[in-house]
Amino acid sequence: MNAQPSLPCFWRDPDLPFVESRRAVSSRACYRPHTHVTYSMGVVDAGRSVFTSHGHSVRLAAGSLVAVPAGCVHACNPEPGGEWSYQMLYLDASWVENTMQRNNAPAWPHCALVVRDARAYDAFCALNRLLFSNADTNVKTTALNRFLSQGIWRTGDAVALTPPPAPASFARVQAMLQQRCADPLPLATLAQAARMTPHALVRGFRAATGLTPHAYQLDMRINAARGLLRAGSAPAVVAQELGFYDQSHFQNAFKQRVATTPGHYRR
């Protein structure tokens, strides 16, 4: 018998502010293309899904693992009419980079990586069970360090989803959208920064990143919202601070990218 669908379960610990975890069972929720300011890694426990990033699409089955660098546009959704169960880890980018460097481990891949390896899946599941447990903080930190540094998660049958090269002008636009995500930024202003017409900017930016400039800015707002909600801010306050039209607009945009409500995520 299939497990009953439920809201995703999040784990956070103030003593380990560099990691967040989630589990979802028999989910039918779908994600809009989005990014994370964190490095993220997930595994499929049951069902089938499709992972997309920068024009690539890869079908995932139970036991698949995906590693995604910070800032990489991606989405992963159940196959049409289906459901799936999965686990995720979100890791602070600076903490990961320092950890890998300190342990002389290879850097995190620069593009999304899909891995099919039973050992990698089992190791991820064991780590996530430990994080959700009542184990000592030092035990959890040591296990997380070991998992990342040993690199078992990047072995086996791996597929790298390499993004196309992007013009330097798009980097200027991305920086502007990141730094001023709560501000109304007219397309004409962004096009001027990129030194191209608005139409050419939208078409080229979507081809390079997977999102239009407007969708990219909205994604930056949701990433900022996650940080504010984790810090305890009320959803209504977050919506106003980040420039959403109203709380309903904020809630809809948040659910499309995080697959849960701001209130549930905050709790």
Image (cartoon, rainbow, N blue to C red):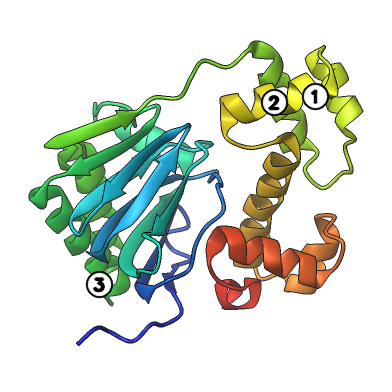
- What residue lies at 25% left-to-right and 42% top-to-bottom? 148
Front-lying residue, 82 or 67: 82
Q: Is residue 98 above or below residue 239?
A: above
Front-lying residue, 258 or 38: 258
Residue 95 picture location, percent across and down: 43, 41
Mark 1 or mark 3: which is in front? 1
Sequence order check: which comes first, mark 1 or mark 3?
A: 3
Q: Is residue 243 above or below residue 2?
A: above
Q: Which residue is mark 1?
A: 199
Counting other residues with Cα less than 10 Å from the Cα at mark 1, is it few (<14), some (14-19), or many (20 or more)?
few
Q: Secondary structure at mark 1?
A: helix
Mark 3 or mark 2: which is in front? 2
Residue 244 appears left or right of 100: right
- What residue lies at 66% left-to-right and 54% top-to-bottom? 222
Residue type of the residue flagged with mark 1: His
Q: Which residue is mark 3?
A: 135
Q: Which residue is mark 2?
A: 203
Residue 191 picture location, percent across and down: 84, 21
Q: Secondary structure at mark 3?
A: loop
Residue type of the residue flagged with mark 2: Arg
Q: Quadrant of residue 48?
A: bottom left
**On the rendered image, what quadrant is the N terminus found in?**
bottom left
**On the rendered image, what quadrant is the C terminus found in?**
bottom right
- What residue lies at 38% left-to-right and 47% top-to-bottom? 51
Distance from disc 1 to disc 3, alpha carbons, whole Å, reads 54 Å
Q: Is residue 161 above or below residue 120?
A: above
Disc 1 and disc 2 in contact, CB within 8 angstroms: yes
Disc 1 and disc 3 in contact, CB within 8 angstroms: no
Residue 100 picture location, percent across and down: 31, 33
Residue 215 appears left or right of 46: right
Front-lying residue, 25 or 99: 25
Sequence order check: which comes first, mark 3 or mark 2?
A: 3
